[in-house]
Image (cartoon, grey):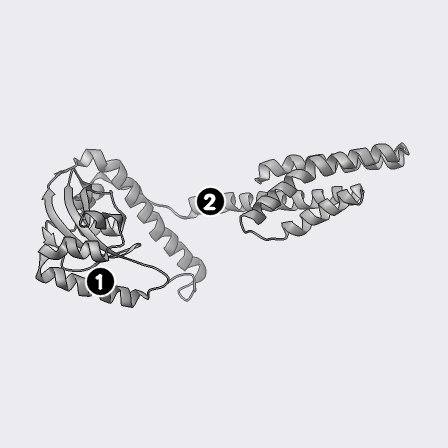
Amino acid sequence: MTAARRFPIVALATLGIAAALLARFGLNRHDLADLILLAVLVVGGLPLVVQTLVGLLRGRFAADVVAMLAIVTAFVLDQYFAGAIIVLMQAGGEALEAYAMSRASRSIEALLEREVKTPEPTDEECRRYYERNAARFRAGDIVEASHILFAMTPRVPPGALRAKAAEVHSIVSRDASRFAEMAAQYSNCPSAAVGGSLGQLGRGDTVPEFDAALFADARVGLLPDLVTSRHGFHIVLVARRVEGSLLPFEAVRAAIGAHLRERSLEQALTQYLQVLGGATSPLVQ
């Protein structure tokens, strides 16, 4: 539950407790006081109980469970005043914590904005980056590829899995005509049913590490090394390539500027931490 949704519960509990105290000790209306406290317990406590139960179902066990049990117990035992106090403490504590974190975050942002200055990238700097990283700004490149995936599993040590992948890679290196056969026998990808074929792939169609290996150069045929990705080890065969074209500088100038600005900010933050903590600070490598 967000802080914005907890503040109304805090207000309800505070006003309800105050009204109940007035009814009990000012008007001598114990029945009215109990009715007000019961309303606080139901209207304010029920959302907290539901939120805690949802958390439990999702595997989260925290101190909220104790508060939930206390609220339910207070309701069952007709201890409405104690229950209302628990609702106030639970909602109020988390709301104040969220408010404090929000204030701290804004203070840090204001401090960094004042102390950490990052220059705006110039056109010359952006163009230089563009020329040195031209491969990143190509569009329309297409690769027709197949792979044999040796997927990571908890049951197989990565070293043993890589060794098996290297063994199969050696086989297809000597005889590429056996690639489809090896894919059908060993690949853990559904593409094994079609000889490992992935069809035509463009930049960004696969996970970044696999994508980088596919478009690293203009090579056609079996890639000389295993490709390691978050999924496991791949033996990759490139059947053909269709060259695309380089995007014009004007089309990517804004994206390059944002990237350089972010990189400059990271460097400035590192230097600022060094100034604050000194060269021996464990926060700075």
Q: Which residue is mark 2?
A: 109
Q: Count the labels in the image.
A: 2
For the N terminus, give its image quadrant: top right
Label 2 crowd (10 A; few <14 / some 14-19 / many >=20)? few
Residue 151 lies in quadrant: bottom left
Q: Position of residue 281 (x, y in %)?
A: 43, 64
State which tag comes first along the sequence, 1 or 2. 2
- Give me the residue at 67% from left, 47% from top: 68
Horizontal relation, residue 58 to residue 281: left or right: right
Front-lying residue, 189 or 145: 189
Please name the residue shown 82% across and 36% down the image.
Answer: 34
Q: Quadrant of the C terminus?
A: bottom left
**Quick one: 281 or 32, which is closer to the camera?**
32
Q: On the image, numbered disc 1 is attached to which residue?
A: 165
Q: Secondary structure at mark 1?
A: helix
> For this view, does 91 lie left or right of residue 284?
right
Q: Is residue 184 visible?
A: yes
154 to 85, vertically: above or below: below
Does 262 appear above or below 278?
Answer: above
Q: Counting other residues with Cα less than 10 Å from the Cα at mark 1, is it few (<14), some (14-19), or many (20 or more)?
A: many
Foreground mark, 1 or 2, reads 1
Residue 235 appears anywhere in the view: no
Q: What residue is shown at x 63% (from left), y 49% (from top)? A: 64
Q: Residue furthest right?
A: 28
